[in-house]
Image (tube, rainbow, N blue to C red):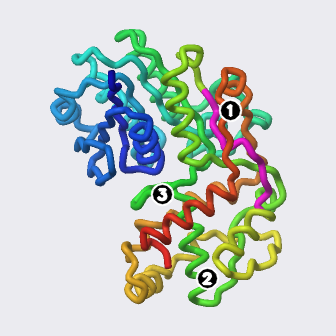
Amino acid sequence: MTKTALVVGASGIVGSATAALLHQRGWRVMGLARRPASQDGVEPLAADLQDAAGTAEALRDVRPDAVFVTTWARQDTEAENIRVNAGMVRNLLDALRLGGTTRHVALVTGLKHYLGPFEAYGKGELPETPFRETQGRLPVDNFYYAQEDEVFAAAQRDGFTWSVHRPHTVIGKAVGNAMNMGTTLAVYATLCRETGRPFRFPGSEAQWKSLTDMTDARQLARQLLWATETPAAADEAFNIVNGDVFRWNWMWGRISQWFGVEPAPFDGTVQPLEDQMRDDAPVWRRIAEREGLAEPDLSRLASPWHTDADLGRPFEVVTDMGKSRRLGFLDYQPTDDSFFDLFAQLRADRLIP
């Protein structure tokens, strides 16, 4: 019998990759978003999760076996992040309760579980790296914790199993996404090539020299499905990264070579992309019009503030994958290939020249 999946946030980086994998594996896939995008094999559903009544109406006839929660809405303060994002999860699970078919809910959060929310990001005493799932919550308010608590409460009430998935920075394709390092770097490299500006690493010396890791959206999707189908993974939280480590002083050269730009020597100073790209919107529009690109609005492709937050960290970030590996999740994804695959897809889709 065909299983039915509800992917919440199906138009985003993680949601679209998850929907694609589920479709490939023979699931019936329903994709929920405020503005659903067209995707092969995905039945679109439109709803704003902040609207409880509207969400209930949109999901009235939806009977999923598994639910994949891959969305959140950024607010101005962490208190508002908690109120809004916990409420979205609560409205979703309340709306699905009447159907009574949900057997598993997978929630995607991230490494801010260990690093703290935006208002306290990387401040205070942090857990030692590599981050492990046995490390407890930080003593600060965090909307990830609030989302988890909503899932835990609904699971106890309604009898489904759950899994929580904590990726590092996610590499994948989505237009209009709030946090998209891969596409941001692709656009930045294209602008440097166009204008003759140096392709400068914008971050900190610690990130330039230290080991780090990342998460391909396809790797995350594979773990989401694995946890849904593996009894031993029920009611557990898992870190999820590609499985390799690298230093940005190596990766920066790999990216520059792909785009045919010369990497500028790193002098140890932070030079944020938000400053470097501040006046680039008209330049990008000119490139898009000349090359016939699909998206002339720079703000819908690049999120320099988020890339700056990741690359500007003054400390090492490495993630342990031992927990899910012990239970049988053995997938691996080279991170430079993640970037190259994304860049090739962006070019094929006429999003970069």
**What is the span of residues highlighted in magenta in the rendered image?**
238-248
Q: Which of marks 2 and 1 is nearer the N terminus?
A: 2
| Local SS, label 1 | loop
Gap in angstroms between the C-alphas marked 2 and 1: 38 Å
Residue beneath disc 1 = 330
Which secondary structure, mark 2?
Answer: helix
Which residue in the protein does label 2 denote?
A: 192
Residue type at tag 2? Cys
Q: Is residue 2 above or below residue 341?
A: above
Taking 110 as reference, is 337 above or below it?
below
**Which tag is nearer the camera, tag 2 or tag 1?**
1
Q: Can the viewer see residue 6?
A: yes
In the rendered view, does 142 fall on the left or right side of 318?
A: left
**Sequence-first disc among 2 and 3:** 3
Figure quadrant of residue 175: bottom left
The tag earlier along the polypeptide, 1 or 3, is: 3
Q: How crowded is mark 2: few (under 14 residues within 10 Å), some or many (20 or more)?
A: some
Residues at discs 2 and 1 in contact (Cβ within 8 Å)? no
> Which numbered circle lies on residue 189?
none
**Callout 3 secondary element:** loop
